[in-house]
Image (tube, rainbow, N blue to C red):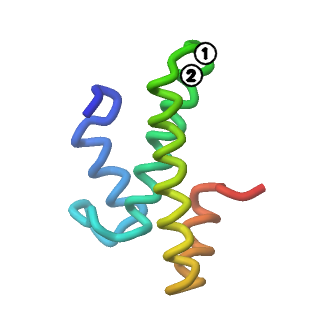
Amino acid sequence: MAEYLSPDKKQEIFGQYGKSNTDTGSAESQVALFSYRIAHLTAHLKNNKKDYNTQRSLLRLVGKRRRLLDYLKARDIERYRNIVKALNLRK
């Protein structure tokens, strides 16, 4: 992993959005982690417009997050609404 995403930062994200600091598997904690990475890559691409490898990685991450959100929406609409609200994913 890159330096911007230290193990401490991961634990903080999992603790805030998951059930505990070690809850790496719940959909909410994964969506939160993907959102953090997406924000970082978006900032990188604003400065490096021709970095197509990073652009592709960003699109893959967005797709992964979308699939996880779709899964949550189908399984438990309340959990979906809570995570979307917590991360400000919708306008």
Which residue is depicted at the point 24% across and 42% down?
A: 8
Where's residue 51, x and y in %? 51, 17
Secondary structure of the residue carrying numbered label 2: helix
Pick the front one: 49 or 32? 49
Kindly indicate the quadrant of the structure image that contains residue 85: bottom right
Image position, residue 21 (x, y; %): 25, 60
Direction from residue 40 to residue 18 in the image, left or right: left
Helix, strand or loop status at disc 1? loop
Residue found at x 58% / y 72%: 82
Tell me the amino acid under the disc marked 1: Lys
What residue is at 31 percent from the left and 42 percent from the top? 9
Q: Name the side, left or right, on which 37 lies relative to 88.
A: left
* Picture layout, residue 86 above or below residue 19: above
User: Where's residue 53, x and y in %?
Assistant: 45, 25
Q: How far separated are the C-alphas under marks 1 and 2?
A: 5 Å
Provide the residue designation for mark 1: 49
- Tag 2: amino acid: Leu
Q: Pointer 1 and pointer 2: residues touching (CB < 8 Å)?
A: yes
Residue toward you, 74 or 8: 74
Q: Is residue 56 above or below residue 50?
A: below
* Quadrant of the rendering where the C terminus is positioned: bottom right
Mark 2 sits on what residue?
A: 45
Q: Left or right: where does residue 32 sit relative to residue 81?
A: left
Which quarter shows the N terminus? top left
Neighbours of disc 2 within 10 Å: few (<14), some (14-19), many (20+)? some
